[in-house]
Image (cartoon, rainbow, N blue to C red):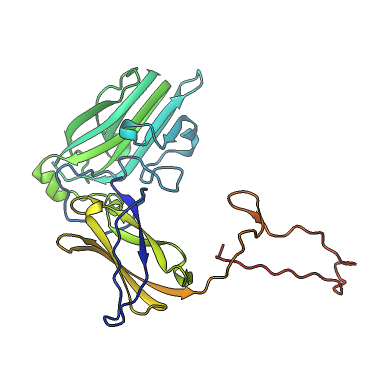
Amino acid sequence: MNSGIRAFMVHLGCNRRAGRTVARSMFCALAAIAVGMALPAAVKPGENILANGTLEADQTDWPIGWHISSDIKKSVKWMPSGGPGALPYFRLESTSSEPQGATIRQTGVNLASNGLYRLSAKVRTKNFQCKTAGVIVINHGWKQSRTVGTIPKDTDGQWKEMSCTFKSFDDKGIHQVVFYAIGFTGTFDVADAKLTAEDEVARANTEPSTLASAMNTPRLVPFAPLLWEIPKSKREVEFRFFGKVPTGRLEDYDLELSVDEPACGVMTVRCVERKIGTVICSEHFTFRTVVAPTIPSSCGRRLNNLSTELLNVPLVGRSPRDRRDAQRFAFTAPRRG
């Protein structure tokens, strides 16, 4: 994905004369995620038409946009790192002496009639033997296909880029991109898949997938604390930036935050290009500040990163129905969850 997350930490103040406050912050921290946007009318030169061609996943076990049959998942692994340029990759692997089969595909790839396209991917193999295998484009029913070439038996641990140029060949323009290996043993790795429009016909009449467009949409999301429980003693909110800036680097942009009331109301947060002031995204959120209870540092016994023991005493009482000796305990929850 060509998207990223950056974290902002901003302070909630209030300029009573202006009726609002504006806070600015630089970017820090890294991650990745996808969000939604409207489709553009055409693709740009070099733009990847595939959804998630870099095979990334965020809080999922499998890269969004790619599908395999459940009965062959044992032969396919998704590796979150270790590919070319530290990218994720798919591994088709047969660990038994019996030849295996595996197919990974992205469906619903709409290409312009008579448009010229280029499909490329980086492959790596080790002791790879097969009846047939490839990185290909197919039409409905797999009646026709175009391939990047013959997959090598062993690349000596190196990633090899393979590609092919072709014209759209499905009558309805609906194609699929497939990584597959039939009757294989050994290891076949695939990474960094790209499908680009190579002439004006293709660029003018091809739309990127919804997911591919969504990955680049700029968006700001509040991360911590809960907006309805912002401590008055620490009036700060951390935002995460999702998507891709239209020009330049993310570090060339600022976050601006304004509030209509200092204690409770609506905050507006924007991502603004620093030099010319262009707003690339704007969001509105309801918030409230509260007095957070003081929690003693010695409170409880830490069990692990998720659990703390607050009480460990024997319960007393004559019977479950006898409440004359009932014990009561009160606890303070500094945050929900």
Q: In terms of image quadrants, where is residue 296?
A: bottom right
In the rendered image, residue 187, in percent from the top left (x then y), is placed at: 41, 23
In the rendered image, residue 221, in percent from the top left (x then y), is placed at: 37, 61
Give the left or right position of residue 98, taking residue 19 as reference: right
- The residue lying at 73 percent from left, 68 percent from top is 329
Depth check, front residue: 106 or 161: 161
- The residue lying at 12 percent from left, 49 percent from top is 204
Rendered-image quadrant of the C terminus: bottom right
Q: In terms of image quadrants, where is residue 258?
A: bottom left
Residue located farthest toward the bottom when viewing the structure as drawn: 17
- The residue lying at 60 percent from left, 66 percent from top is 333
Compared to 244, does 148 lie above or below?
A: above
Is any atom of residue 38 visible in this view? no
Rendered-image quadrant of the N terminus: top left
Give the left or right position of residue 299, taking residue 202 as reference: right
In the rendered image, residue 55, in percent from the top left (x then y), is placed at: 35, 40
Depth check, front residue: 71 or 191: 191
Compared to 189, does 198 lie above or below?
A: below
Compared to 14, does 47 lie above or below?
A: above
Q: In terms of image quadrants, where is residue 265?
A: bottom left
